[in-house]
Image: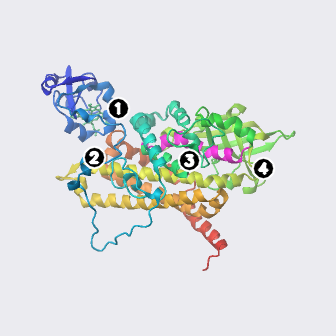
Amino acid sequence: MSGIFSKTDVSSHNKPDSLWIIVDDDVYDLSKFQDEHPGGKKILQRVAGKDASKQFWKYHNEGILKKYQKQLQVGSLDSKPKAAATPPTPPATPPPQAAKNEDKVVPKAEPGTVSATPGPALSEAEPLDMFGDLIPGGDPNWYQSYHSAYFTQSHADLRAEVREWMEADIMPNITEWDEAKKVPDSVYKAMGEKGYLAGLMGVHYPTQLTDRKVKSVEPAKWDLFHEMLLTDELSRSGSGGFVWNLIGGFGIGCPPVVKHGKKALVDRIVPGILAGDKRICLAITEPDAGSDVANLTCEAKLSEDGKHYIVNGEKKWITNGVWSDYFTTAVRTGGEGMNGVSVLLIERDFGGVSTRKMDCQGVWSSGTTYVTFEDVKVPVENLVGKENQGFKVIMTNFNHERIGIIIQCLRFSRVCYEESMKYAHKRRTFGKKLIEHPVIRLKLAHMFRQIEASYAWLENMIFQCQRMNEVEAMLKLGGAIAGLKAQATTTFEFCAREASQIFGGLSYSRGGQGAKVERLYRDVRAYAIPGGSEEIMLDLSIRQSLRVHKALGMKL
Ligand code: HEM
C-alpha cells in the first residue's frame, strides 16, 4: 500500500483485468474486488484508470473507505500533499487558518436578541477544545467550545479515548455484527480491560473490586458525568443492539448485586464480571408481567433445611440472557403484591436454567432471551437485599436504568440528525442540495430543538443524582427521570422518522448510506417500551412529582 504513482501510471490500469481508481489522491486496485462490489462491476469499469472521488462520495460514507482501505489501497498519487495523514479521531482543534484574524468570525447580536452579561468566571466552566465534526447539534455543544458547568478536562480526555477506540475498532463492523446478531466476545472483554464496565454502575469507581483502571481518568475523579459520556460515545455506534450487547445486561444486572448483595457474594462474582470474563443480566419481566412488576409469578420456595431457594418460572425479553453466567432475578418468595418479591442472584452453573434467543424487531445483536428456571437450587447466600423486600432493590435500580436509556436515545437522535445533515449537504433533488429546501431544514430544526432541550434536562438530572444519595434521588428525581425517559424516547422516535424521510429509499433498504437510520428506526420500540413504557412513565412523572412536592409543602 506504499506505492507512489502518477495519474498517467493509474490511467494505464483501465481494463477489467487491471482496474485501478483514485479516491482522494489515494490509489485503489479493484481488479479482484469488482465481482463482489455491491454496486456492480460495470459502474467500476466505467471509471477504471480515473479519479473517481466524486462518484465514490456520492454513493458511500467514510466508513466504507476505512473498512476496505487495508485490503484495496495500493498507494497514493505523487501529487498528494505530504501532510495529509489524518488521525483516526476527528480534529480536536479548529483548522489553523481559522485562527487568522481576517478569517475570524466575530459573532454579532441580531437586533432583538439579549446580549449575555458574562457571569463570574468559574474555572470549571472554561470552554474546552473543539472536538468532532462541529455540526451544530451533531455533538453536545460543550464538544464545540461552548461553556459547560459540568464537563472538565478529564471528561474531554475520556471522550478522546473512547472515540478513538470506537472509530478504529468498532464503527467499521457495526452493520456486520448487527446482521450476524452477535458482537464478538472480545469486544465485551475489551470493555472490561479498559476499565469501562467498572465505571458504568452508578457508583464510585470500585477499586476494591477491580484492578482495571480507565486510562484517561483517575478512579478517584470518576463521576456520573464520565459515566454519561462513556455511554453517550458508545451510542455513536448508532446501534441499540451493540450498546445493549455490551451494557444492556451488565448496566442493570450488576449494580443491584454490588449495592445490595452480601460481601462474600460480591467478592466472589463481581471481579470476574468487571474483568469482562463473565456476563450478568437482569431478569424481571415475565410473559405476563412487564411494567406491573408487583404481579410477577416466578416462584422461589425455601427448602426445608432453610439453605436453598427452589426457583421455578419463566422470564421473557431478557437482554443478554443467552450469554449470561449470572441472572439477577426477581422472584416471588411471599404473598401477592410487591411485599412478596425478593431478588436472587441465579447462576447458570446451578443447573435447571435454559435460555432461548428471541427474534425481535430491533436491537438484533443484544441477545433478547426467553429464560426458563426449572427447580433451580439457589443458596440463600445469593439473596440480594432482604427477603420480601426485593421491590426496594428493583425500585432503586430504576433511575440508573432509565438514565442509561435516556443517554442512548438522545445520542441515537443525534446520530439520525447528524447523518441527515451530512446527507442533506450532498444529495441533490430538483437542482438543489436537500439542505437548500426549506422543508428539509424544518425537519432538521425540529430534531435539533428536541435533542438540545432534552440533553439540557439530562445534564441537570445527572447533576442532581450526583448530589443526592440513592434513596433521595429515587424519591425526588423518580418523577422527573420518568418524564425525561418519555421525552427521550419520543424525541428518538421523531428523529428516526424524520431522518428516514430525508434519506428516502436509502433508509428503507438495509446497509449502505442509510444503514444507521434504517437500523435505529427498527430499534425505537426497544427503548419506548421497556424500562417503563412511555404511558407509564408520563403518568408516573406527574404522580411521583406531586407526591414528593406535597411532602415538600406544595401549595395548591
Ligand atoms: C474503493 C472503492 C470502492 C469500494 C470499497 C466500494 C464499496 C461499496 C460497498 C461496500 C457498497 C455497499 C453499500 C454500502 O455499504 O455503502 C457499495 C455500493 C455502491 N457503490 Fe461502491 N465501492 C467503491 C467504489 C465505487 C465507485 C468508484 C462507484 C461509482 C463509480 C461506486 C458505486 C456504488 C454504487 C452505485 C453502490 C450502490 C449504492 C446503493 O445501494 O445505494 N462504488 N460500494
Which residue is the extreme one toward the top? 17
Give the residue number, with chain letter if any, for mark 2: 95
How far apart, in angstroms, are the residues tagged by discs 4 and 2?
Answer: 61 Å
Which labelled disc corresponds to residue 449? none
Give the residue number, with chain letter if any, for mark 4: 387
Q: Secondary structure at mark 4?
A: loop
- What is the x, y in percent for residue 242? 48, 40
- Binning the other alpha carbons within 10 Å of mark 3 as few (below 14), some (14 to 19) or many (20 upward) gives some
Mark closer to the chain start, 1 or 2: 1
- Binning the other alpha carbons within 10 Å of mark 4 as few (below 14), some (14 to 19) or many (20 upward) gives some
Three-letter amino acid code of the residue under disc 1: Lys
Viewer-nearest of discs 3 and 1: 3
Q: Nearer the viewer, residue 284 or 206?
A: 206
Which labelled disc corresponds to residue 222? 3
- What is the x, y in percent for residue 183? 49, 34
**For residue 332, side relative to residue 453 (left or right):** right
Mark closer to the chain start, 1 or 4: 1
Q: Are marks 4 and 2 in contact (CB under 8 Å)?
A: no
Three-letter amino acid code of the residue under disc 2: Pro
Three-letter amino acid code of the residue under disc 4: Glu
Give the residue number, with chain letter if any, for mark 1: 67
- What is the x, y in percent for residue 165? 44, 37
Q: Main secondary structure of the magenta part?
A: helix
The residue stretch that appears in magenta: 237-261
Q: Are marks 2 and 3 in contact (CB under 8 Å)?
A: no
How far apart, in angstroms, are the residues tagged by discs 2 and 3?
Answer: 31 Å
